[in-house]
Amino acid sequence: MSRIIALSNQKGGVAKTTSCISIGACLAETGQRTLIVDLDPQAHLTIASGLNPDDLPVTIVDLLAMADEPVDQVIQPTSVPSLDILPADLRLAETEMSFYNHPDYEEKLVDILGQLRSRYSYILLDCPPSLGGMAILALTAAEYALIPVPCEYFASRGLIRMMDIVEAVRKRTNPGLAYGLFVSLYDARNRVSRQILEQLRDHFGEHLFDTVINIDTRLRESTMVGEPITTYAPQTRSSQQYRALAQELVSRLEKKNSYE
Ligand SMILES: Nc1ncnc2c1ncn2[C@@H]1O[C@H](COP(=O)(O)OP(=O)(O)O)[C@@H](O)[C@H]1O
Ligand SMILES: [Mg+2]
């Protein structure tokens, strides 16, 4: 059964999409079959995987519309062996609006992913930068919310709302939801970065990952060429940091198992 992880934070530009494709590629690199799922109407994950959303005859939008679309026709391979994607397109914004007429919409993704859980070791969900229906859908389907945080002064304040949502989803639809945070844009040249990291550690304790991801323009470039960092620049520090992050995630998930 696959482990399902939602990359979630209502703030945009915190590296959710970059982390989704990078961690996915790192897990696939170790031979684990991995699926990344685009849940953002902007379809950045789809584009970052080298696909053009406008060229795709079917996407996750068709699965969520419950048009009995076979899931196999929607899954696309990526340039990385063992890494597949469920792509999105712009119509996903309308899908999210339609949720408000369906009181049980939260379970829709659970049903779709249920068909795939025997085929993938890991399923990573890339959430949009909001805490609307799509984010709730993802947090209901996931066992773990992985929250990227930039290393900036107001980071922990902005996270209060995110934590409220995790708590609300636990109460309503998914009592087993666990979470962890990691610093996704660490500026080593900025003197206060270390201080902020310590504040985050004080605030979130064990929930904060040991691994941090430094700011690196190669990550920006890799998104633009539609390739994960691990194949675009496999030996760089960012690649190594994302490999370490993926390993830390795997060991945290295993540890979580032993408590259950
Ligand atoms: N560690 C990093 N260093 C430099 N740029 C980064 C890093 N991580 C992500 N980026 C860039 O920051 C921008 C926002 O990242 P993205 O993954 O799209 O965030 P989100 O999905 O949270 O909106 C993108 O242009 C991306 O290439
Ligand atoms: Mg994104």
Image (cartoon, rainbow, N blue to C red):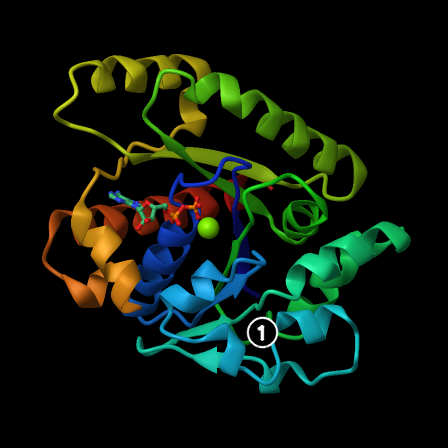
Secondary structure under the numbered disc 1 in the rendered image = loop
Residue 83 position in % (x across, y down):
39, 73
Q: For mark 1, what is the residue?
A: 118
| Residue 105 can be seen in this image | yes
Q: Quadrant of the N terminus?
A: bottom right
Residue 37 position in % (x across, y down):
53, 64
Q: Residue at x 12, y 25 (%)?
A: 189
Residue 57 position in % (x across, y down):
59, 85
On the image, which quarter does residue 79 sit in? Answer: bottom left
Is the residue marked by circle 1 packed among few (<14), some (14-19), or many (20+) residues within 10 Å?
A: few
Residue 258 position in % (x across, y down):
51, 43
Q: How many marks?
A: 1
| Residue 204 can be seen in this image | no
Q: Is residue 228 above or below residue 166?
A: below
Ligand 2 within 8 angstroms of badge 1 C-beta:
no
Q: Residue at x 48, y 81 (%)?
A: 76
Q: Is residue 222 above or below residue 151?
A: below
Q: Is residue 3 left or right of residue 102?
A: left
The residue closer to the viewer here, 53 or 216, is 53
On the image, which quarter does residue 114 sit in? Answer: bottom right
Q: Residue at x 81, y 58 (%)?
A: 98
The residue closer to the viewer here, 213 or 98, is 98
The residue closer to the viewer here, 150 or 80, is 150
Q: Tag 1: residue type? A: Ser
Q: Quadrant of the C terminus?
A: top right
Q: Is residue 106 above or below residue 188?
A: below
